[in-house]
Amino acid sequence: IDSLLGNLARRTQEVTQQMQGSLLVSNTSVARIQQARDSFDKIRGSVDSIRDQNTQIATAAEEQHQVAEEINRHIAQIHADAQLVEGFAHSAQTGSGRLT
């Protein structure tokens, strides 16, 4: 009986140590999983921030494109007006030449 009780106590001690080891491994795994989740949360936040910045850049680029088109239209209008003024000046010069 003493031998059986000794074996039982020893086996109980071994099982307890194995359970404590398993608990330690489980706790370490849980901590690593939490770290991984935190890392993924940071990555997701960074991706969201990059997506927002890309949207802002695309919007700004579109606005710049529209402004550039408007400037081009104004330049074309100025060019047309300058040609018109040149035509008037040429007509005035021709007309004044006839007067003299």
Image (tube, helix red, strand yellow):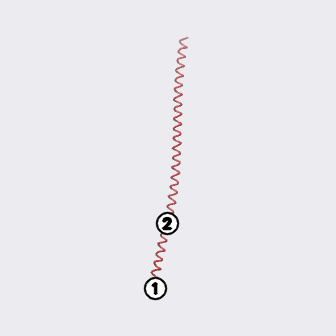
Which residue is identified by label 1?
Answer: 96
User: Relative to residue 88, is residue 23 depicted above or below?
Assistant: above
Looking at the image, residue 16 lies above or below residue 29 = above
Give the position of the C terminus as an image quadrant: bottom left
As drawn, 97 above or below 49? below
Residue found at x 48% / y 77%: 85
- Residue 71: assigned label: 2
Crowding at mark 1 (Cα within 10 Å: few <14, some 14-19, many 20+): few
Q: Earlier in the sequence, mark 1 or mark 2?
A: 2
At 53% from the left and 25% from the top, the residue drawn is 20
Residue drawn at the location 48% of the way across and 72% of the way down: 78
Furthest-top residue in this view:
1
| Place of residue 65 in the rendered image (x, y in percent of width and height, measured from the top left) | 49, 61
Within-10-Å neighbours for mark 2: few <14, some 14–19, many 20+: few
Image coordinates for residue 21, horizontal then vertical, percent: 51, 26
In this rendering, the answer to whether 17 lies above or below 46 is: above
Q: Secondary structure at mark 1?
A: helix
The residue type indicated by label 1 comes to Ser
SS at badge 2: helix
- Point out which mark residue 25 bears: none
* Distance from the alpha carbon under mark 1 to that under mark 2: 37 Å
Which residue is located at x 51 percent, y 57 percent?
A: 60
Q: Amino acid at mark 2?
A: Ile
The total of numbered circles placed on residues is 2
Q: Where, quadrant-wise, is the N terminus in this rendering?
A: top right
Q: Which residue appears farthest toward the front when viewing the image?
A: 100
The x, y position of residue 27, in whole percent, is 54, 31
- From the viewer's perspective, is the residue at label 1 or at label 2 nearer? 1
